[in-house]
Image (cartoon, rainbow, N blue to C red):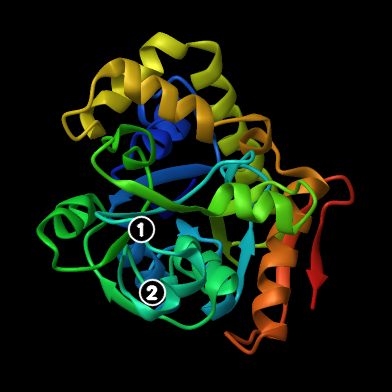
Amino acid sequence: MKQVTLGHTPDADDAFMFYGIASGNVSSPYFKINHVVEDIEKLNKRAIQHELDITAVSAHAYAYLKDYVILNSGGSFGINYGPIVISNRNIELKKLHEHKIGIPGKMTSANLLLNLAIGKFDGIEIIFNKIPQYVSSGLVDAGLIIHEAQISVGDEFHKILDLGQWWHDFTNGMPVPLGINVISKRSLATQEIIEFDRFFKRSIEYGLEHLDDALEFSMQFSRGNSKMLIEKFVKMYVNDLTTNMNQEGKDSIITMLRKAKTNRILSYDELLFIDSNNQQIQKYH
């Protein structure tokens, strides 16, 4: 049995995905899991240093990684919804780039999407759940909100830009690529990578089949929100593409990163995905 470090965020949707494994209801004779729970931007940085065998990362952060393969399972995709820019005042969209904007991390997919949508801007890194507070107090002109704040934020804010809707229109209906799970080629052989992907898929399916129990487990990461709101959030981001991103999910990730490369926002050598049908790793440039 192989011992592996598995990083995921203290967020309800991640907890839901890993409920089957964490509860012991889904097991594997091949892997012994050491769970590491960190904020997504910390996981992004740890993956760059190659400190984790398997981890959740932002789709944006993948451009900075080496020797990690994107799993078919565990992706977070918005379906015509996603991160939102809010403000105390009604800022004109065409002038949004002139303002100081609170962001949840430079390597988050939300930050990359905003950069693609409005061009360069002054982004101030803030812990994601503190961004509405910073906007309210005027410490930033606007805030880029993610996670359950997208659906819990109050009417006191103006919604300046819905990046989920922007991406949907920009790509003619592609899902919004936000979070992914990646696995190290340095730590695991190709067949082990494919086996773990199957294992993780079973965990997600178990959560969906035992919805109430998985939601109850996820509530430890509710950050004071109601179970009703957490259930809504989980159902938004644990969808069919989470179980298996298929080519639709792959294409959305490739499109976002290629567009950023074309715009000289970032560069990368190759994108690696699992081709489970042919038991091999796919390469895209």
Amino acid at dot 2: Lys
Residue drawn where x is 67% and y is 85% of the image:
263
Instruction: Determine the residue positioned at 31% across, 60% down.
Output: 143
> Which percent across, then down, holds residue 72?
68, 47
Position in image of residue 189 (x %, y %): 66, 62
Residue 269 at x, y percent in the picture: 70, 85
Q: Please tell me how crowded label 1 is: few (under 14), some (14-19), or many (20+) other residues with Cα within 10 Å.
A: many
* Residue 118 higher or lower than 15, as above or below: below
Residue 40's disc number: 1
**Quadrant in which the C terminus is drawn:** bottom right
The reply to whether the C-beta atoms of the residues labelled 1 and 2 are less than 8 Å apart is no
Q: Tag 2 or tag 1, which sits nearer the N-term?
A: 1
Residue at left offset 33%, top offset 76%? 99
The percent coordinates of residue 2 (x first, y second) are 48, 51
Q: Secondary structure at mark 1?
A: helix
Residue 86 is marked as none
**Residue mark closest to the camera, 1 vs 2:** 2
Name the residue at 64% across, 44% down: 197
Residue situated in front as seen by the camera: 13 or 170? 170
Query: Is 111 situated above or below 22?
Result: below
> Relative to residue 187, is residue 148 depicted above or below?
above
Query: Residue type at mark 1?
Result: Ile
Q: Is residue 193 left or right of residue 100?
A: right
Pick the residue in front: 159 or 128: 159
Place residue 216 in its image quadrant.
Answer: top left
- Marks 1 and 2 sit apart, C-alpha to C-alpha, by 11 Å
The residue at which mark 2 appears reads as 106
Q: Is residue 253 left or right of residue 14?
A: right
Q: Secondary structure at mark 2?
A: loop
Quadrant hosting residue 11: top left
Q: Determine if residue 21 is in view.
A: no
